[in-house]
Image (tube, coloured by chain):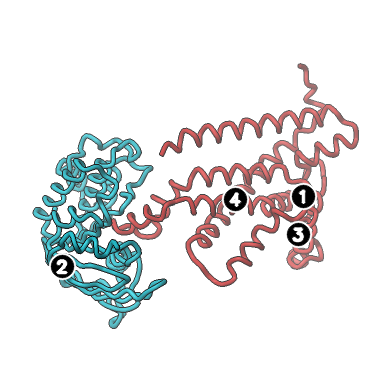
Chain colours: A red, B cyan
């Protein structure tokens, strides 16, 4: 198969992968502590907070995009302030990361909560009676035992971030070489009849995602023997 | 010596327990399920907190509602044997046993030697690199006991330690526990449903029913049927 690579813009691939890694990282850093707190403590308004956190999962992406525009758009709550100090988030790759993170967050959060809930509290209790402080309990007992569930969450949020379309289009636009991610590139390639780009990008992302899932499942089966 | 006086409001009743245990003595706590026995153990170890009362071990005050003292579990120096062993599944037997000595106040480079000694004493040295899922019930119980004792506790709590074991293994472990009682001379509290375990190991007995305790010194088979019914 002879693919004329010079005719295909491969920028979307690098952007999508970069955005997916960054978003998955940001989301993990924020969702893990939140899931841990929500799992461990009971406080008032917890169910409302949880519903808000899960909202981007059930809302149409265009609604999420609209809400983000209200926030970081030129006249938005935050965007207005940023515009005044000479910064703009919309129509930059940062907006791509923000959109991807917002839609991926509920997936990581949900997986993390499930993962932490699946850890038998007796293990943590045993660690405490043996002299471990709370941080040690978390890093040496809870985290390793929750790890398979957390990894699933990471992969899911990575994939979701990579596939984000609707919200991305609204806050970042489809600017080739700047904010055009793989899903956007595929859509507009199909629209404009560019079958070569469409087929190539579809093939690349499909193979990549398939290998990712295959690797993670294999790893999970090996890891969780107990 | 351990002296306990605690009150805690639970779902259906008020838990009120008060007793003392001398070093080298085994106090058996028994009663029907839901009577509050495990809650007593959890309160003593610092995993849960009484509403009111006092817990004193040797000369140390672990909990006192009147003096506003409440030591966290990690500072109480109390060994706890859970009903399901609670061996860390992602660590080997050796790593499980080494977990406690890392946080002991006298932790030093000799702790590796200490762990090996412990495993030897409990007959599990050959299992050092095995994972808990590879062990039999009796081996898990030995490992859990060795892990608790490796942390050099001043009090040992056992929650139905032999409940899921067969008779030969139970006899083995009863002998092991008697050795621990003799060698370590610390107070031991045993929660059990098994009358034979209670009679074989216990020096004093407390019957807990719906949160209230009564002291008995000897268990007769009639006592068992009376609370079973």
A108, A187: nearer the viewer: A108
Q: Position of residue A188 (x, y in %)?
A: 85, 39
Q: Are marks 1 and 4 on the same chain?
A: yes
User: Does label 3 or label 1 sit earlier along the sequence?
Assistant: 3
What residue do we see at 31% from left, 53% from top?
Answer: B83
Which image quarter is the C terminus of chain B in? bottom left
Which chain letter goes with mark 3? A
Dot 2: what SS? strand
Mark 3 and mark 4: Cα distance apart in space = 20 Å
Q: Residue furthest bottom?
A: B66
Is residue A205 visible in the rendered image? The answer is yes
Labelled disc at residue B21: 2
Which chain letter goes with mark 2? B
Q: Which residue is under mark 4?
A: A108
Question: Answer yes or no: do the residues labelled 2 and 1 have beta carbons within 8 Å?
Answer: no
Dot 3: what SS? helix
Q: Are marks 3 and 2 on the same chain?
A: no
What residue do we see at 53% from left, 70% from top?
Answer: A43
Is residue B79 visible in the rendered image? The answer is no
Mark 4 and mark 2: Cα distance apart in space = 49 Å
Labelled disc at residue A68: 3
Check disc 1: other Cα within 10 Å, few if <14, some if 14-19, many if 20+.
many
A51, A203: nearer the viewer: A51
Eye-nearest disc, 3 or 2: 2
Q: Are marks 2 and 1 on the same chain?
A: no
Eye-nearest disc, 4 or 2: 2
Mark 1 and mark 4: Cα distance apart in space = 19 Å
Q: Position of residue B105 (x, y in %)?
A: 22, 59
Eye-nearest disc, 3 or 4: 4
> Is residue A224 rendered to the left or right of residue A60?
left
Which chain letter goes with mark 4? A
User: Does label 1 or label 4 sit earlier along the sequence?
Assistant: 4
């Amino acid at each position: 198969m002879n693919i004329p690579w010079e005719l295909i813009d491969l920028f979307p691939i690098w952007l999508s992968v970069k955005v997916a890694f960054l978003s998955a990282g940001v989301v993990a850093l924020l969702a893990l502590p939140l899931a841990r707190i929500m799992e461990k403590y009971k406080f008032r308004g917890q169910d409302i907070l949880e519903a808000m956190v899960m909202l981007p999962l059930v809302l149409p992406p265009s609604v999420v995009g609209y809400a983000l525009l209200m926030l970081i758009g030129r006249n938005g709550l935050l965007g207005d302030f940023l515009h005044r100090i000479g910064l703009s988030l919309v129509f930059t790759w940062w907006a791509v990361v923000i959109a991807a993170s917002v839609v991926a967050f509920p997936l990581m959060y949900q997986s993390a909560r499930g993962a932490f809930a699946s850890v038998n509290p007796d293990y943590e209790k045993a660690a405490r009676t043996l002299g471990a402080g709370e941080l040690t309990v978390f890093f040496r007992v809870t985290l390793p035992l929750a790890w398979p569930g957390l990894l699933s969450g990471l992969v899911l949020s990575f994939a979701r971030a990579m596939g984000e379309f609707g919200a991305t289009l609204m806050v970042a636009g489809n600017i080739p070489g700047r904010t055009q991610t793989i899903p956007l590139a595929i859509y507009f390639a199909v629209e404009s009849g560019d079958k070569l780009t469409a087929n190539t990008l579809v093939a690349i992302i499909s193979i990549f995602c398939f290998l990712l899932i295959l690797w993670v499942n294999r790893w999970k089966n090996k890891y969780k023997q107990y | 010596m351990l002296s306990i006086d605690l009150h805690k409001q639970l779902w259906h009743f008020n838990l009120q327990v008060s007793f003392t245990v001398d070093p080298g003595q085994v106090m058996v706590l028994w009663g029907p399920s839901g009577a509050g026995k495990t809650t007593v153990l959890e309160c003593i170890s610092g995993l849960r907190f009484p509403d009111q009362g006092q817990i004193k071990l040797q000369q140390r005050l672990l909990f006192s509602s009147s003096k506003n003292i409440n030591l966290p579990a990690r500072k109480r120096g109390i060994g706890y044997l859970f009903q399901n062993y609670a061996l860390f599944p992602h660590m080997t037997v050796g790593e499980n046993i080494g977990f406690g000595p890392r946080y002991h106040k006298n932790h030093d480079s000799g702790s590796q030697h200490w762990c090996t000694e412990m495993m030897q004493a409990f007959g599990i040295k050959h299992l050092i690199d095995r994972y808990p899922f590879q062990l039999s019930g009796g081996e898990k119980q030995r490992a859990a006991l060795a892990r608790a004792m490796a942390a050099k506790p001043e009090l040992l709590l056992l929650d139905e330690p032999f409940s899921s074991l067969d008779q030969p293994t139970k006899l083995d472990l009863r002998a092991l526990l008697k050795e621990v009682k003799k060698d370590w001379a610390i107070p031991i509290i045993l929660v059990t449903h098994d009358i034979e375990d209670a009679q074989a190991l216990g020096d004093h007995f407390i019957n807990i029913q719906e949160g209230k305790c009564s002291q008995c010194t000897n268990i007769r088979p009639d006592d068992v049927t009376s609370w079973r019914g």
